[in-house]
Amino acid sequence: MTASTVNYLWSIQDVLGQGATACVYKARNKKTGEQVAVKVFNAASYSRSYEVQMREFEMLRKLNHNNIVLLYAVEELASKQKVLVMEYCSGGSLLSLLEEPENAFGLPETEFRIVLQCVVQGMNHLRENGVVHRDIKPGNIMRQVGDDGRSVYKLTDFGAARELNDEEKFLSIYGTEEYLHPDMYERAVLRKPQQKGYGVTVDLWSIGVTFYHAAAGSLPFRPYGGPRKNKSTMYNITTKKPVGSIAGIQRDEDGPIDWGYNFPHSCQLSQGLSGQLVPVLAGILEADQERCWSFDQFFMATTDILKREPIHLFSLMQATASCIYIHHHNTVSMFLEEVASQTGMAVESQQLLYLGHELPLEGNMKVVNLPPTSAAQPLLLLGLGPDTNPAEIPAIPSRFDVMADYRFSKVMVGVVHQFVRTVRTLHAQRELLLQGYYSYMYKTHCYTASYCIFLAPLTPLQIREHLPMYVGGVQQFQNELEHLLIEQAKLAESLANDKSHQKMKMLLEKISAIHQMYRKDRQTGKLGYNDEQIHKFEKIHLSTCMKRMKTLFREDSVKRYKELLATSSTWSRSVCRNPALTTLLKEPHVLWFFKLIYTDSGNQSVSLTQRHFHYVCNGHLNKVGFKARGTNTISLFTL
């Protein structure tokens, strides 16, 4: 069955969304075939005053911004019902995106930053036009997907919107209860009489809840049993939360509230971004309107975050990835201080490599001059000594719900997506560890040795007298380094043959297929005998897949990761605290000896038995050989 206006046609089965006063359909232009969204108002909408009915039309005509759904036309059905013809957003809503199992623990950081940018810019346009939305939530943020696959988010549903200046108040109640400001919640949900006025900052509370939901995959304030079943506790959580907290969860009936001052470990935001965002949420998730941030403060803080450049970093000693958010005009000194803040490694102990080469940094150098980085190609952070804090295995959340098979399977798909992401992260960190230590062994210390040779002025006679003290040290360190490189090569081969990530993805596909079958079963309702048996068999299959997944994760990915951490810890101690190397680099006799070799292009004669010494110069590995020409003389040549 279809419906139409003068210029647009749609099927009543193509429902995009439905509310109390209207239904939204996907429609097409009769002449061009262009897809649009049409909002058809129902009989309940006409019970409102004419002023309220016209408000949404007027709001959309007034607003014109890339992050607000565009109004094309206002038309009528044959029954004279008003129809809004609007821009169609093919990506659905932010809520539908968050309901996808892979986003059960929040959006990836890159996608969250797009949400942050689009919502901030859209809200800024509203405030510039003196408009308060009054129903900000993920379901009212639409997603458009461009030709390049990049998302653009747009605010929609201005049925509750009205013009309101910063100093003005309103008394009417609108909004969705999980995202309502506590003052409005008290009157609208708890039905407590009050004559309190509400200002534009009610949108800030809704934005804060929305941002938390997008980052963590769940609501920030959750009483036992859920917000809609335990309304009084929900109100107490939002009004009595400590200053600085951004979440409150009641895990047991009549139990205490666990206050959160950061995002959960399971969320995909880096420490760098979450550290910038938490103060913003703490400022706008404030029930006391006197203490709540103003829109100016909110826009200033979020704009500052969005202007920062992400610099990806991988700490070799800690086996942890970091992302430093910093302004491009800041100095490298400020960048290194932020690295120290996140990693605990003192500035003077930091060494950075990029693509295997040491990165020369000066304190007054600007961040804009740093090379481009990504999660796959970060800066490698080294230290003058190994870090004493062991690397932590990323936390894996255990969210299992057995109330219904459908809900259970949906939760399982979300959990397995989290496992797959963790396995992918562990695999990537193993690669970075191996690449980093390869560069570390072959470059950093050998280059340091060749660089330090310019420091001490000694004569060849003094060298002969002290030669026996360091000849053995050179050979000892070289042998140890060669042994470490052999170990590294074996582990690199093992990593190349590791198929745990592919196996985990196959299990994810099987569990997702079961979830889709359970979704159909839920829609069917009562199952026949045969379908019921199939349903039960698939439940056993689901349990088997979960056991295999947990075993694969624990016995394969985590075990190999721990083994590499233990091995890399040994490498770190050997390379950083090798007694022979430490003594060698501090001996002025050795420094002068290498300077003599390094600077002489002829056949310099010094007293040394046949030895080899490796050094790196300008990123290229060279082997300098010392070939015996007699009992006490050698000639220098390059292999």
Image (tube, helix red, strand yellow):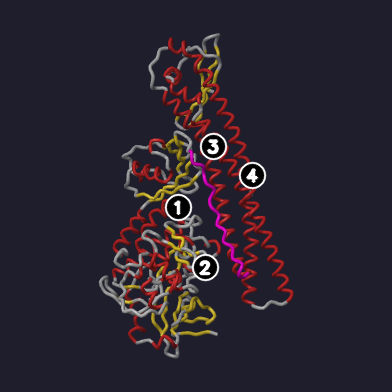
What is the CA distance from the residue labelled 3 to the residue labelled 1? 24 Å
**Picture quarter containing residue 156?**
bottom left
Res 567 seen here: yes
Q: Amino acid at mark 2?
A: Glu
What is the CA distance from the residue labelled 3 to the residue labelled 2? 45 Å
Which residue in the protein does label 2 denote? 253
- Is residue 513 positioned above or below 42 on the image? above
Quadrant position of the C terminus in the picture: top right
Q: Amino acid at mark 4?
A: Asn
Q: Amino acid at mark 3?
A: Ser
Percent position (x, y) of residue 34?
A: 47, 74
Give the extent of the magenta segment: 388-404
What is the CA distance from the residue labelled 4 to the residue labelled 1? 29 Å
- Please tell me whether mark 1 sits on a helix, a strand or a loop: loop
Q: Earlier in the sequence, mark 4 or mark 3?
A: 4
What is the CA distance from the residue labelled 2 to the residue labelled 1? 33 Å
Which label is found at residue 270?
1
Percent position (x, y) of residue 151?
A: 45, 63
Is residue 398 part of the magenta span, yes or no? yes
Which residue in the protein does label 3 denote? 569
